[in-house]
Amino acid sequence: MAHSETAKPTACLVLADGSVFYGKGFGATGQTVAELCFNTAMTGYQEIMTDPSYAGQVVTFTFPHVGNVGVNPEDDETADPVAAGMVVKWDPTEPSNWRATERLEEWLEKRGRIGVGGVDTRRLTRAIRQQGAPHVALAHDPEGNFDLDALIAAARGFSGLEGLDLAKEVTCAQSYRWDEMRWAWPEGYVRQTAARHKVVAIDYGAKRNILRCLASAGCDVTVLPATATAADVLALNPDGVFLSNGPGDPAATGEYAVPMIRDVLDKTDLPVFGICLGHQMLALALGAKTVKMNHGHHGANHPVKDLDTGKVEITSMNHGFTVDSQTLPEGVKETHVSLFDGSNCGIAMDSRPVYSVQYHPEASPGPMDSYYLFERFAKAMDDRAA
């Protein structure tokens, strides 16, 4: 059912500039402060909410019908929602999907995440585009009692994501093995039983579907925490190293991640593949710099051009920082660029199988145009072993 304009508001979203958006709350009650971003994907709201790259952020969904396919345990990208909250145009509808096991509202309530429906998300999205990603306070009270002055103060008091290392908050507590492959009809998820390569994946906030893509490409995956050292990595005698996605300011995470990556590059000729935050970590390790974007890229419809082939891929993205391509050192080339704004979307070393992309080639949600990157990683390990 669509939100009624005459119903008493039970939730509100307050921006640091004093703007207030009222709506109908769902999910958990209480309040939270975060950075506000928007996501343009038409599917995959559960995967988006459980993507660790959204730590510290409230997500505005530009697609109005959220909740219509419900939720199910198979589509979680990590154990619990990581995004701080969600903002949608219409109140969540009854789920209509054979895989659904629970309503979105119940799922959010159990996991302590706030949602608000009935918001003019087009207006909100324009504000984010024009002003940059704002700091916000999101509150849900079934009685509709809100202290706006306190909420505005809370939004203004949010420190923001710059300088914030969130990878440590979302990474695994200890290492573990992964052998589950991508979902396929009719079996669903099956196990990898014929791995050709040992891969160490550094978890800066890894999504499960990324690990599944590695397993489907023939990799025996061992996941290590974000703070793993080069000695930890090399002790496992891997055939390749993978650098995962994750949240926060890459410069902050880079304080411990960059020395590890440089050490691995200096001591070995291992293939290295990074995505999202892992892409930024590799760029920093190679001598480039990162910068905060105005409103970032979040969605499943982002066109990216491969500069080597001229091919355009439609990709899934989730990042608020970007690699400054003007700072790439000699011996490192730009391989992909965004056709939305020309920002960097990929790099590679000239002489070694070391490369990374800004987008999410596992595409959960999103198109499958970029899965070949996992196969390229496997081929690099094949070539090294030959």
Image: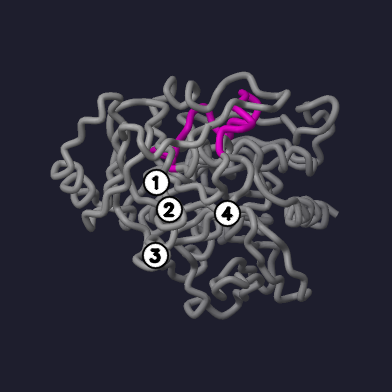
Pick out the residue farthest to the left. 149
Whether residue 331 can be seen here: yes
**Of residues 65 and 238, the one drawn nearer to the viewer in this rendering:** 65
Q: Main secondary structure of the magenta part?
A: loop
Mark 3 or mark 1: whose residue is earlier in sequence: 1
Callout 4–callout 1 Cβ contact below 8 Å: no
Disc 1 target residue: 57
Q: Secondary structure at mark 1?
A: strand
Disc 2 target residue: 37
Residues shaded magenta: 66-87
Q: Secondary structure at mark 3?
A: strand
Disc 3 target residue: 292
Mark 1 or mark 2: whose residue is earlier in sequence: 2
Image quadrant where residue 330 sits: bottom right
Q: Is residue 208 left or right of residue 131?
A: right
User: Which class describes the residues within 10 Å of circle 1: few (<14), some (14-19), or many (20+)?
Assistant: many
Mark number displayed over residue 335? none
Callout 1–callout 2 Cβ contact below 8 Å: yes
Disc 4 target residue: 299
Residue type at numbered disc 4: Gly
Residue 314: image x %, image y %? 70, 60
**Of residues 263 and 55, the one drawn nearer to the viewer in this rendering:** 55
Residue type at numbered disc 1: Gln
